[in-house]
Amino acid sequence: MMASSYSAKEEDGLHSGSAGLGGAAIRTRKPDNTAFKQQRLPAWQPILTAGTVLPAFFIIGLIFIPIGIGLYVTSSNIKEFEIDYTGTDMSSPCFNCSQSFSWNSTTPCRCVLFFSLDQPFESNVFMYYGLSNFYQNHRRYVKSRDDSQLNGDERSLKEPSKECEPYRTNENKPIAPCGAIANSMFNDTLDLFYIDPNGTKTQIPFMKKGIAWWTDKHVKFRNPGGSNPNLTAAFIETAKPVNWRKPVYELDTDPENNGFINEDFIVWMRTAALPTFRKLYRIIQKKNNMTPTLPRGNYSLEVTYNYPVRSFEGRKRMILSAISWMGGKNPFLGIAYITVGSICFFLGVVLLFIHHKYGNRNNSSDIPN
Amino acid sequence: LKILLTPNVRGNGYFPLSVGQAHALEADMEREFLETACACRAVICCRVTPLQKALVVELVKQHKKAVTLAIGDGANDVSMIKTAHIGVGISGQEGIQAVLASDYSFSQFRFLQRLLLVHGRWSYLRMCRFLCYFFYKNFAFTMVHFWFGFFCGFSAQTVYDQYFITLYNIVYTSLPVLAMGIFDQDVPEQRSLEYPKLYEPGQLNLLFNKREFFICIAQGIYTSVVLFFIPYGVLSYATQSNGVPLADYQTFAVTTATALVIVVSVQIALDTGYWTAINHFFIWGSLGTYFTILFAMHSSILFNIFPKQFHFLGSAYNTLGQPVVWLTIALATVICIAPVLAFRFLKLDLKPQLSDTVRYTQLVLQKKRKPGGRAGRGVGGAGVASGSTLGRLGRGGSRRSGYAFAHQEGFGELITSGKNMRLSSLALATFASRHSGSWIDTLRRKKHANSTDKTR
């Protein structure tokens, strides 16, 4: 009968002591009595009580509202000026340039816009160009580049990546730099002139270095041929991109800003996330602490209108902006912080009221037996 | 078919005792049998074949909206165990056939209570929380691309870096939810046994049903809206403190990805109710791993080896070094988490479930017992208080764990006569004395009676 083989060890634990002597040879399948296996690990068990949640809401509200006010006040004090120079309507000075664009024209079309600044700009002023309705974040567009070619790799220079199609080769010669991003590089020239009260025009000096990321300029983008200053020889047997007027080794006379490491080119290659974007064009450095960088008065913006935007209903504009610790003018963040802070505080008050009036005073008498 | 309704000892219900039960399982009778049986507190079916056992279970499964559990220890219980939703096998006197066919097995019948009230309940709770969080985090992650589609010409451009997409579900968010699915406990085990009513949410399917699923999805979609539109609103016009705009694709990608990882980590921190050391390690470790891998992949070392793969060079450093970006991430986190916190607090305050009340009471008791100490082992004094309860529940019942039913009378008298085994119990002793005389004589008498019947 099966009764005889009944193992006393499978009995409840109380008798294991007495049976241990006789049943020591029998392997027990009882699980180990460790904290891990018996799910008795020491643990912290948080509970959402009124004492933790309500102060949390009040603290968040009390932190966010001052931050929001600080951000909003800082942002309101930043001066910014924007002018659209697309030239779509007839009264605009750039109307003729925008209508009569052709790829083959050798003489560039120029137009002049006049504007005035009511307030002087102190310290460094940053000049941006902005584009609208330009989808630099389109998937096919974002892929269309060759990072090893831009890093100065010789093999990629001669054989660009397939992602660059159809801007990979031109007349059997590889395009350098290849791809749709490089091909559509922004090539308008903007010049700013100050017109003082008696009519003399002075050009405002720009700084064209320091507009790109340091890692981009010094690590990511390298000219082929190493530190050889003769770029024309390095780019031999390559073609310029289809829509460019000048090849890549003639972008600037300064050898530190020529070829792939041209900062305007690098800034353009850093694709924007949204269809309306702005990119840094030039920096106007402050002269000294006495005179403002851009004094109050009349100015003229001279545009060499090279970049066609009419075909995709895009818009072009020029922006002048001062900068603070939080960047440029950005009211959204300040307003968002104030809103969220006040909502949290108000929510805290509402929850406190509800808890006081209707809340359960938790006690064990509530547990049904 | 005879169904005898005998009142039970305590007089609170009837036990039907059905004899000749084979007929009850015929098609025309089965519904009546089921209705009658369900009107009673307990039903005893004796002298059933294995097939009939399986048929009883099948009957309940088909006509009643219930989950069935069958427990047995012998080879004749195998069909019943396989038919039921949950089959439990007892490994012991009758061999291991029942164990091999079952979903769960243990050595003693009384462990069934722990299986259901402690382990089954915890398992249901963990599974529901795990599912809800898993859907939430994936919706929060994926729907951002849906919103971005409106702004990228619907070209299916991803918002995040491709390596982030690969590693998100594998490395950055898998371990915390795994730890929650393994270790979570809402109520310690002694309390689970003390309050069987805690088992009800599992029976009523309260923790994960269509309504809860849609709430998880809605929360995921809301999170994705916040995670896209807050960086969109801030970064469109933001610039770094050196004038370079922050509106480029890589900055946007890093900001959104970092905000996402932080928000889902805070959410799992809210969901986890039982923080063991392993939970701490997994949650904080996952966040740390995210930042480590982020900086590693955006470093120049990897870029120089594979320029086309790791073209996010410098993004992490340039992006996460800007205070504007951290302010954006903090704002997105608060907007995502504050409503959740408010809802959960209101639910706990206005309509606490039994498990919430028990949990709260338990922790208050522990705090009283150990002033200044954190809520540690759940055993504590609560174990002492309920030890007597356990004692009452655990000690009762016979030592025998297996029950076997046979077709005929069999050799039961072999045991009840007392000749082979010592009868320690008084009840059995009186039973034996009733059948005076040798059991062999009894058998002979019966055999003789049968043969005389046949000759007639």
Image (cartoon, coloured by chain):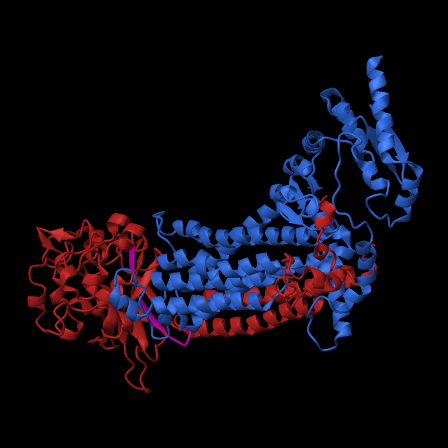
Chain colours: A red, B blue
Q: Where residue B284 sits: x, y (%)?
A: 51, 68
* Residue at x-position 34% and y-position 80%: A123
In the picture, measured across the screen, residue B163 lies left or right of residue B67, that is: left
Number of marks in picture: 0
Q: Nearer the viewer, residue A150 or B454?
A: B454
Tell me which corner region of the image, top left, top right, bottom left or bottom right, holds residue A216. bottom left
Q: Nearer the viewer, residue A324 or A5?
A: A5
Q: Where residue B309 sits: x, y (%)?
A: 29, 60
In the picture, measured across the screen, residue B432 lies left or right of residue A216, that is: right
Task: Indicate whether B418 appears above or below A86.
Answer: above
Tell me which corner region of the image, top left, top right, bottom left or bottom right, holds residue A1. top right
**Residue range (magenta):** A315-326
In the picture, measured across the screen, residue B194 lies left or right of residue A207, that is: right
User: For the view shown, which residue lies furthest in the top direction?
Assistant: B456
Q: Where residue B55 sits: x, y (%)?
A: 69, 30
Q: Where residue B364 sits: x, y (%)?
A: 76, 68
Task: Indicate whether A352 appears above or below B95.
Answer: below
Q: Is residue B11 visible?
A: no
| Residue A323 covered by magenta stretch | yes
Tell me which corner region of the image, top left, top right, bottom left or bottom right, holds residue A324. bottom left
Q: Is residue A2 visible?
A: yes
| Residue B50 covered by magenta stretch | no
Query: Which quarter of the figure is the C terminus of chain A placed in?
Result: bottom right
In the picture, measured across the screen, residue B252 lies left or right of residue A361, that is: left
Task: Indicate whether A191 appears above or below A169.
Answer: below
